[in-house]
Amino acid sequence: MTGGPSADNGPESGDSETQWPVTLAGVSETVVTTLGPNERWNVAALGVHAPDGDGPATATTWGRTRTWRNFRERGSGYVQFTRDPVDFAEAALSVREEDDPVIDSADAWVTVDVERRDSGNEGDTQWVEWALNPVDSTVERRVVPTTNRGHAAVVEATVAASRLDVPSYDRETLLDRLAYFESVVETAGGERERAAFERVCDLVDADW
Amino acid sequence: MTGGPSADNGPESGDSETQWPVTLAGVSETVVTTLGPNERWNVAALGVHAPDGDGPATATTWGRTRTWRNFRERGSGYVQFTRDPVDFAEAALSVREEDDPVIDSADAWVTVDVERRDSGNEGDTQWVEWALNPVDSTVERRVVPTTNRGHAAVVEATVAASRLDVPSYDRETLLDRLAYFESVVETAGGERERAAFERVCDLVDADW
């Protein structure tokens, strides 16, 4: 179903039991696809927290999102590592559904079984922390990574944009941040970062 | 002198004349080492602008920095791609000199001949734009890249910090930004991002 090279057990992980094809540290911003009740794959952003000691990697869903629903109903998903800022922005801010679970820009993906680990409330929002147990992983390509401030600015813009309707955040501060990140994309972004920021502007009902 | 695997002509570039081992788009934040008059290698940050059409990649130095001096006197340097935020922060904000031109964390490096291409003034600061002509490149490792907001926040913090003494920037805005990026490192960074932010705090004479 996924195509590409065969599974890679992640020489960087140093642990034969884990199959993450990357070094997880802190929170890695990924794209996750989960199978919905319509048998289509919902594409969303997911922050993957590195394992704490011997524990599993984890991720938290906030509210009754599609990812939350599909994790609960299906107990699995595809965690994907992509450098493409357009795919990331759409995953973070739009409802996107695909016939295939793997997006074209994924450098690697991991099928995970997920298990509810903890839950709670923050304000009116219920959060659920999920343990992510890698089942299989595929590496499509390995490259020399580069650092582009425009790419990071797109990611930060999606974070700010997704908080605009959350009462505990100050809207003016978020809009100032969006303006700053737009300027960073203009200064340092490439073509894909500019396209991604246009998507952010299309998807967010606000002016800055 | 550099060790590691032999030169790689960059299958991603699609141009046999160029030897960048990465896809350059927009501005890539790199670490550059240049040989000083004391025969030691100065380690600094350098934003590499992707070629515009058939032109070369370029980078701009601002003011009479060591990189500017060494580019002018030596006409060359080592452009390095590293994921390590501590090395990046030190390159950006401190004076660091090494006996060897290649830093340990470099995933790849490119020896470049540099040529003054343009220059001008912004405020009291003279800038020089340099053409970077790759001579040889070495890839130490290729990996599946990950996106970490904490890493990006360290990079942004070095940018804000380096502007604190520039009169055309509003200091309070920069300090607010530094506080925000510190919170991002706390939320999303791994161990290296936390260490890098501590270095930023050590190296910057300001409180936020």
Image: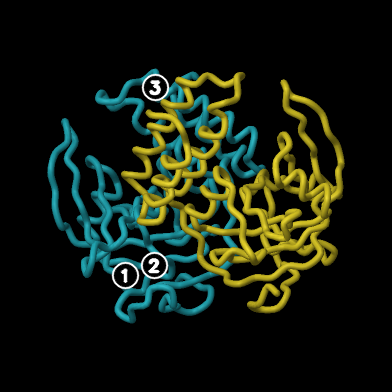
Chain colours: A cyan, B yellow
The amino acid marked with disc number 2 is: Val
The kind of secondary structure element at disc 3 is helix
Q: Crowding at label 3, few (<14), some or many (≥20) Cα neighbours within 10 Å?
A: few
Q: Crowding at label 2, few (<14), some or many (≥20) Cα neighbours within 10 Å?
A: many
Q: Name the front one of labels 1 and 3.
A: 3
What label sits on residue A45 in the rendered view? none
B48 left or right, relative to A125: right
Do the numbered discs 2 and 1 sit on residues whose CB atoms are within 8 Å? yes
Query: Is residue A156 shown above or below B168?
Result: below
| Chain of the residue under the numbered disc 3 shown in the image | A
Task: Work out whether residue B141 or residue B197 is closer to the camera in this orientation and state it.
Answer: B197
Measuring 70% from the left and 74% from the top, which residue is drawn there? Answer: B1
Measuring 55% from the left and 67% from the top, which residue is drawn there? Answer: B104
Q: Crowding at label 1, few (<14), some or many (≥20) Cα neighbours within 10 Å?
A: many
Q: Position of residue A33 (x, y in %)?
A: 38, 56
Task: Work out whether residue A28 or residue B94 is closer to the camera in this orientation and state it.
Answer: B94
Do the numbered discs 3 and 2 sit on residues whose CB atoms are within 8 Å? no
B175 left or right, relative to A146: left
The amino acid marked with disc number 1 is: Pro
Measuring 65% from the left and 43% from the top, which residue is drawn there? Answer: A190
Of labels 3 and 2, earlier in sequence is: 2
Q: Name the residue under label 1.
A: A134
* Residue A160 visible within the image: yes
Q: Name the front one of labels 3 and 2.
A: 3
Whole-angstrom CA distance, mark 3 to mark 2, is 36 Å
Of labels 1 and 3, earlier in sequence is: 1
B151 left or right, relative to A27: right
The kind of secondary structure element at disc 2 is strand
Q: Mark 3 points at which residue?
A: A173
Measuring 23% from the left and 41% from the top, which residue is drawn there? Answer: A64
The kind of secondary structure element at disc 1 is strand
